[in-house]
């Protein structure tokens, strides 16, 4: 083991007829990051193999120092189902496993098979799979040592709550969910639909506030409302809906009947406040008040532009 508790090297020995043991193999793992998946392996004193990861982070190919490349084709669970050499003179190898990782049919033993796309190696004496800090036995569907995390699973040895299809426990500490392509697509488009709805809802909330206050101001409080510079609704001349030089509530800017407060720069400043309302909806009132009454310390005034707002900050 190395200092990080990862498998660093191992040897194999064979017992002779005279009872003595002789080393027949030795391999060394080399890591390029904090994970427990080796980047390359010293197979013999003259042979190395390199594990090539794809854009998704899974194992895509294994190459040698001489340029031989074998593609690792995986299914949606992360199991290597075909080992495809780029050398057309070599035949591809088909692999198949049940849900717990037992080989099916005439599948031959290989380093990366079941969960091979996650670089879970089955290159052990008994065929157990290296799962982080523990060994997993596919024949029993259980780990061979107790869970180092108390309460990490239903009991100290079982794997993924008895659901190896939809869950993983790649590091032997705690299992997580595996989402199928359909579930991931549903989550993706569902999230996009929700965010689109949220943006529409916040814009509508800003319009409700702006239009409602413009109606109240013009009907009862003496404001006169019209659009300025093609940007936003400006209500002037009344009282009760604005503080300081003017206030934007929703999509409406209420101010005094004074050209200083309705200049192009000031309208540009208040138009940015309008877009802040349209981005956050009703929540923006609380967010603005929480930022403080001092405009030079208020981040929303800073984002709207202190100079356009007439603040000497």
Image: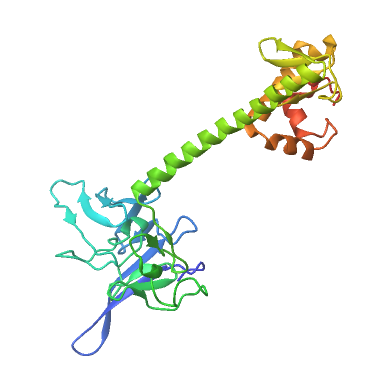
Residue 285 lies in what quarter of the image? top right
Residue 36 appears at what percent x and percent y? 44, 62
Of the pair 16 and 305, the residue shown nearer to us: 305
Name the residue at 18% across, 64% down.
Answer: 107
Quarter of the image for the N terminus: give it. bottom left
Quarter of the image for the C terminus: give it. top right
Of the pair 87 and 159, the residue shown nearer to us: 159
Q: Is residue 206 left or right of residue 22?
A: right
Tell which residue pokes out farthest to the bottom in this image: 18
Residue 83 appears at what percent x and percent y? 22, 53
Q: Is residue 85 left or right of residue 40?
A: left
The vertical placement of 220 against 160, above or below, is above
Residue 268 appears at what percent x and percent y? 72, 17
Indicate how the structure is coloured in the image: rainbow
The vertical placement of 78 against 187, above or below, is below
Of the pair 42 and 237, the residue shown nearer to us: 237
Residue 270 in sight here: no
The vertical placement of 63 against 139, above or below, is above
Report the label total.
0
Name the residue at 46% across, 59% down.
Answer: 35
Residue 31 appears at what percent x and percent y? 44, 59
Residue 248 in sight here: yes
């Amino acid at each position: 083991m190395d200092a990080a508790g990862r498998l660093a090297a191992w040897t194999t020995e064979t017992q002779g007829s005279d009872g003595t043991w002789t080393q027949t193999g030795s391999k060394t793992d080399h890591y390029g990051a904090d994970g427990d998946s080796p980047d390359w392996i010293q197979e013999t004193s003259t042979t190395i193999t390199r594990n090539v990861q794809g854009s998704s982070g899974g194992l895509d190919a294994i190459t040698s120092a001489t340029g031989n490349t074998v593609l690792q084709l995986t299914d949606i669970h992360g199991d290597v189902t075909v080992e495809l050499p780029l050398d057309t003179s070599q035949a591809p190898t088909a692999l198949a496993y049940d849900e717990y990782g037992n080989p099916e049919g005439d599948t031959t033993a290989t380093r990366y098979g079941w969960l091979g796309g996650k670089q879970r190696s089955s290159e052990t004496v008994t065929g157990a799979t290296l799962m982080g800090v523990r060994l997993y036995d596919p024949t029993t569907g259980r780990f061979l040592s107790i869970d180092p995390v108390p309460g990490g699973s239903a009991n100290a040895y079982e794997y993924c709550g008895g659901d190896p299809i939809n869950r993983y426990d790649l590091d032997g500490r705690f299992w997580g969910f595996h989402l199928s392509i359909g579930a991931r697509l549903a989550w993706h488009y569902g999230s996009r639909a929700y965010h689109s709805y949220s943006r529409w809802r916040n814009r509508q909330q800003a319009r409700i506030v702006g239009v409602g206050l413009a109606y109240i101001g013009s009907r009862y409080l003496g404001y006169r409302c019209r659009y300025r510079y093609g940007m936003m609704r400006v209500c002037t001349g009344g009282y009760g809906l604005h503080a300081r030089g003017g206030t934007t509530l929703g999509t409406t800017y209420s101010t005094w009947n004074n050209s200083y407060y309705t200049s192009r720069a000031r309208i540009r400043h208040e138009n940015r406040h309008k877009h802040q309302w349209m981005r956050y909806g009703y929540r923006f009132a609380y967010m603005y008040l929480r930022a403080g009454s001092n405009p030079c310390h208020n981040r929303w005034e800073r984002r709207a532009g202190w100079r356009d707002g007439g603040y000497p900050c």
